[in-house]
């Protein structure tokens, strides 16, 4: 074999290797320079990031309600990052879609904790989704911030319940209805945990306070056929309907009630899951004149609320609306950040212990703080839906109401004890 035939390829290999090393060195220097530039620009490197989960239904029947809660959560994260982050770390949201399916919520919650290593999760709407996630957070020692009103009858160290307990929403609404003379109440809800438990509590109080349960009906979550229900409502002749339907079932219900010549102006409806966002999606004329009970309305005349509304509109469009679960989703991020700073730790156990020790705050919904049972003190409001899709506030509680997870009349002897 000719020596030049051997030397030629060897020399080519060596020269290619040299060029490769040179390119690698150049890339390394470029990467270092880029990191230095990013640092100078104030953009956090990997060690300066803390990951949180944002888990809502972005598809399916509940998307009508949950997409905007996700938006409000991300708004709070952006604001906190712009102000310097939490414990000198930039918050990185990992957004997942629960797809209106409790099993999917549980699966995504586990993925966020185990694979993404988030330090906390913000999300959930239906009680079915919350109950599906609860054992995941308890098993893996995580912490969920739940922003929606619910039926109570639950108390876990793994959840911060900022949404209303029954004594902060459905029972004040019942008291208001009785004061208005509405004492024959027809109960209508989606067929899952929140409506059935809420109506169990309502039945106890309606009967205890001298009223009458005119009827009680449920439809599957996402159900659209209300013909049989409306016939039963006509036969029952109630003074008012207490509506715990969730998601886009409300669109079908109100359309079919109007077609049956039973608009809210003829038969009052008190809703617990229709807020500004749902009214806008449904068309305000469809639900105009109906009532809702919440712990926040966009129409609240308060500087903190005006700031929140303006910030949301600036980010998501001037024609955007905000509502109660959105306000709670927004609040939850700020409360988590404040609890982290007070605990000087991202550890979920330390954070949830720190949260109830935070001071009272004047926020977009009024004065609030977390109680030792990890639920929120908050003011109750009853509003009437106006033609522009906003609620005229008709009544509010004199002060923030202490959260009581277990209704004494419905669940005597049960207490919430969190250690």
Image (cartoon, rainbow, N blue to C red):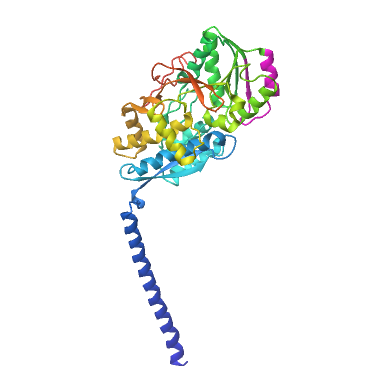
Question: Residue 325 appears at what percent x and percent y?
Answer: 48, 30
Residue drawn at the location 35% of the way across and 53% of the way down = 45
Q: Is residue 228 magenta?
A: yes
Position of 417 with respect to 151 (left or right) is left
The quarter of the displayed image where residue 21 is located: bottom left
- Examine the rendering and report whether any part of residue 34 can be seen: yes
Taking depth in this image into account, of 212 and 230 the one nearest to the observer is 230
- Examine the rendering and report whether any part of residue 111 can be seen: no
Question: Residue 62 appears at what percent x and percent y?
Answer: 56, 34
How many labels sit on residues? 0
Quadrant, the C terminus: top left
The quarter of the displayed image where residue 13 is located: bottom left
Q: Is residue 13 magenta?
A: no
**Is residue 394 depicted above or below 274 in this figure?**
above
Question: Residue 50 appears at what percent x and percent y?
Answer: 37, 45
Taking depth in this image into account, of 205 and 153 the one nearest to the observer is 205
Question: Residue 291 appears at what percent x and percent y?
Answer: 54, 20
Taking depth in this image into account, of 21 and 180 the one nearest to the observer is 180
* Magenta residue span: 215-235
The outermost residue toward the bottom is 2
């Amino acid at each position: 074999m000719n020596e030049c035939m051997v030397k030629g390829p060897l020399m080519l290999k060596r020269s290619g290797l040299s060029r490769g090393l040179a390119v690698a060195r150049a890339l390394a220097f470029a990467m270092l320079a880029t990191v230095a530039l990013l640092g100078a620009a104030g953009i956090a490197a990997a060690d300066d990031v803390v990951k949180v989960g944002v888990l809502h239904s972005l598809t399916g029947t509940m998307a009508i309600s949950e997409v905007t809660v996700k938006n409000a959560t991300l708004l709070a994260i952006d604001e906190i990052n712009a102000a310097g982050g939490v414990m000198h770390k930039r918050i990185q949201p990992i957004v997942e879609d629960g797809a209106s399916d409790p099993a999917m919520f549980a699966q995504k919650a586990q993925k966020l904790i185990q694979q993404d290593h988030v330090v906390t999760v913000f999300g959930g709407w239906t009680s079915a989704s919350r109950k599906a996630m609860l054992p995941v957070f308890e098993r893996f020692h995580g912490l969920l911030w739940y922003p929606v009103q619910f039926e109570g009858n639950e108390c876990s160290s793994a959840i911060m319940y900022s949404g209303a307990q029954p004594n902060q929403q459905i029972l004040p609404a019942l008291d208001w209805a009785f004061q208005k003379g509405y004492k024959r109440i027809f109960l209508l809800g989606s067929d899952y945990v929140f409506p059935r438990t809420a109506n169990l509590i309502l039945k106890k109080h309606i009967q205890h306070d001298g009223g009458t349960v005119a009827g009680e009906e449920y439809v599957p979550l996402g159900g659209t056929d209300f013909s049989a229900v409306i016939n039963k409502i006509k036969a029952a002749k109630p003074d008012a309907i207490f509506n715990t339907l969730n998601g886009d079932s409300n669109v079908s219900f109100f359309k079919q009630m109007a077609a049956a010549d039973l608009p809210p102006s003829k038969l009052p409806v008190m809703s617990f899951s229709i807020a500004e966002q749902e009214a806008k999606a449904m068309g305000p004329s469809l639900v105009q004149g109906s009532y809702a009970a919440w712990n926040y309305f966009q129409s609240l005349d308060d500087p903190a609320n005006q700031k929140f509304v303006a910030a949301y509109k600036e980010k998501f469009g001037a024609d955007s609306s905000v509502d109660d679960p959105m306000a709670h989703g927004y609040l939850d991020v700020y409360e988590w950040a404040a609890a982290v700073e007070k605990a000087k730790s991202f550890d979920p156990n330390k954070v949830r212990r720190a949260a109830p020790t935070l001071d009272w705050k004047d926020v977009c919904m009024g004065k609030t703080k977390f109680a030792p049972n990890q639920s929120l003190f908050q003011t109750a409001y009853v509003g009437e839906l106006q033609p522009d899709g906003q609620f005229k506030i008709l009544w509010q509680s004199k002060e923030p109401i202490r959260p009581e997870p277990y209704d004494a009349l419905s669940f005597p002897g049960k207490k919430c004890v969190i250690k």
